[in-house]
Structure formats: structure tokens, C-alpha cells
Image (cartoon, rainbow, N blue to C red):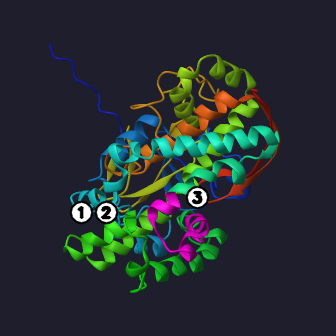
Amino acid sequence: MTETKTKTPEQTPPSLNINLFSVSSLECPYENYKTIRDTAPVTYLSPDGIYALGRYTNVRQALTDWEKFSSSEGVALNDGMNFALKGTTLGSNPPEHGRLRSVLTRPLMPQSINQLRERMQGLAAELINNLAKKGQFDAVPDLARHLPLTVVSELVGLPEEGRQRMLDWAAAGFNCMGPSGNERVENGFPTIMEMGKYVSDPSLPDRLRPGSWSATLYEAVKSGELVEKEFQSVIAGYLTPSLDTTIFAISNMIKLFAENPEQWAKLRAEPALAARAINEALRIESPLQYFSRLTTEEVNVDGFVIPANSRVLMMFASANRDERKFQNPETFDITRASTGGGGHLAFGTAHHMCAGRNLALLEMRVLLDEMIKQFTSIRLISEKRVINNMLRGYQNIVIEVDPAN
């Protein structure tokens, strides 16, 4: 006799009165994330009228299903920013996404990034040596920003006035991903409009540094591979994601070690754990908290139905602390084995996985390797958090270190 399986009844996702974009939540979001995860596979966040996926398996599966969870209508939470994102690498689906991404990632492939290793190692060694002598310093401007601002801004190849504005453009770009009516969204749009005006300036291509990413990109326009508007959108793809996310990843990692001296001692005793330590820092304090997708049809997620044309939050940072995936997820453990590759979602996954992850990992690794050599201990003195709609990081982290020699 054949057993008949009972079909799980479809349910409406429960509604939660959680505002993820309040200052209090942005400062300390993890209790809200756990409430969302524990309530249901899908929840409806009533203050902003959005659905949310907070569990690891659901987030990962949705990110791979671009046909049902689409990026082509943008990945922000307001119409203005989503209109601006349409047709960009962030705001597109395959096959269009693949064509744009292939151009964007040409200078970001492993072979190209590895050519930067020696230079970055030299810069990191000099920087960490000088900081070890100082003993006390602010790890955000003095350490975390150094390689991104020294190397990445040069690689992008903008004229000096553009390089000076990259941090402001990046912060505004992520703030403008927030929900309608949000103060940081409204305050960020003038800065984003300034960036748009800058990258669309007809004189910009003639002022790009020869051989830079941007100059090479413009060759694709000359060859007919890209049109001018696509060139501008890919340039914006170099500007907004390439700095703040890496700076926050580095500074978050430093603070974690300052707060967990036993983990720092363990890493210094076994430097081969460096790659795991970096992935663990990215997991437990993900710089990018979330992006969104739009459902193209009614979607059933573990028995809970999301209507068609619904905006759905992909909660990377919540997924990375999901007890269903990670044992003791609130614990910073550099020996954790399951955080790389198929593990954490700090870089996203599938088609929209972070294009600059190889560069970010290189920057984090060369700095960490030198810190292991030159800092015997790291102590936290003070901190000040950045409040950003999509990013989690610090404006200042003052630390005290003991030099190895």
C-alpha cells in the first residue's frame, strides 16, 4: 500500500512590528534578526511593508533562484533608487547581468588580483610596523582605510577630485538602498546625484588614469561592447561597493580580535588559521547586512506564501548567525571550519556574488598576516559606530597594541 504524503497547508507569513532601519536596530540588530528567524521562514515587516528571509537555507536558496526572486527591478527598498539601479550589474538578471558582469570583473579576476599581492604586502608591512611603534591609534582611518584608499582608488583611476569623493559616494549609495521616507535615504540622494553627474561627464574618459580599470572599461565603449550608459553604470559599480565594505570588514575583524584576546593568541600561535579567521569575522560581523529582490510570481517558502510583485529582504547577516546552520553562531571562533565556500553569505552567492571578493580577501589577508607578526596583543580603548541603512561598521575604533619587537 502506497503511503500518501500530506501536503503542508499554505500559510500567510506572520507580521512583525520590527523596524530594521531605526537607529537602535542599526546599532544592535541581532535580537531583531533572531526574532525574525525564530518566528517563521518568511515574515512580513509591517513598518516598511516588506517580506524578510532571515534563515540561512531560505536566503541561500532565494539568492540562487533569480527567476522567482528577481534583481531586474533593483535591489533597494525604494522606487527612486531601484529606478537608478535598473540595467546595472546590481539591477539585472541573466543573461544581461552576465554580459555586464564579465566586463566589470575583468580586472578583478584572481590572476590580476594576485599581481597586486607583492605591492600590498609591502604597503601592509610598512603600515603595521609604523602603527606598532605608535602603540595606540584609530584602526579605522589609520589602518582599515589605508589599502583601499591607497591601492583601490588608484586602480579605479579617477582624477583626484573623484578619488576624494569615493568614500562619500559609497556611504550615500548604500544609505539610499533603504526604505522610502527614511532620513538617510533622503539625505543621500543629493550625493548620489552628484556621483551620477560626475560619471556621466563627457570629459571624464579623457581624464581617467591610463591603464586603470576605468580607462580599460572605456575601451569596451570604443569597441562597441558597451554603450555610454552601461559604461557609467559599471563605473558606479567600481565606486560604491569597492571601499566601504572592505574598510568595514577590516575594522570589524580588528574589533573582534580586540574583544576576544584568546582568539588573537590562538591565531598568533597558529598563523595558518588566518583564512578561517577572516571568514569567521565576515560571518559574525557581515559588512553588508542585506539587499532585496522582487518576486516575479507567487512563491512558497517552506509552506509560507509570498505574493507576486513583493519586495523581499535577503538578510545576509541574519543568515550568517542562523543556529540552524552554525553551532554557537554568536561565538567568534577562528577554528570554525564551515565558514568558507559554501558557508557564510557575507559576499552573497550565485550570479550576484560580490565581484570584488578576491580583492577584499587579499587586502584583509596581507594586513592580518602583518598584524600577526607585529602585534602581540590588541586592546580596545573606544569605538564609534557608523549608522548606515545597509552596512555595519565603525567610524572609529581606538586600539592599543603591544609590538612584537
* Residue ID for mark 3: 149
Q: Secondary structure at mark 1?
A: helix
- Provide the residue span drawn in magenta: 152-172
Task: State yes or no: residue 161 in magenta.
Answer: yes
Residue 394, given in percent of the width and then of the height, sits at 70, 51
In the rendered structure, which disc, 2 or 3, sits on the residue that comes first in sequence? Answer: 2
Answer above or below: position of 309 versus 161: above
Q: Quadrant of the C terminus?
A: top right
Answer above or below: position of 237 versus 347: below
Find out whether the residues at labels 1 and 3 contact each other: C-beta distance under 8 Å. Answer: no
* Residue ID for mark 1: 96
Distance from label 2 to label 3 (Cα)?
A: 29 Å
Answer above or below: position of 203 versus 386: below
* Residue ID for mark 2: 92
- Left or right, 374 with respect to 291, comes to right
Find out whether the residues at labels 2 and 1 contact each other: C-beta distance under 8 Å. Answer: yes
Mark number for residue 368? none
Q: Amino acid at mark 3?
A: Leu
Q: Quadrant of the N terminus?
A: top left
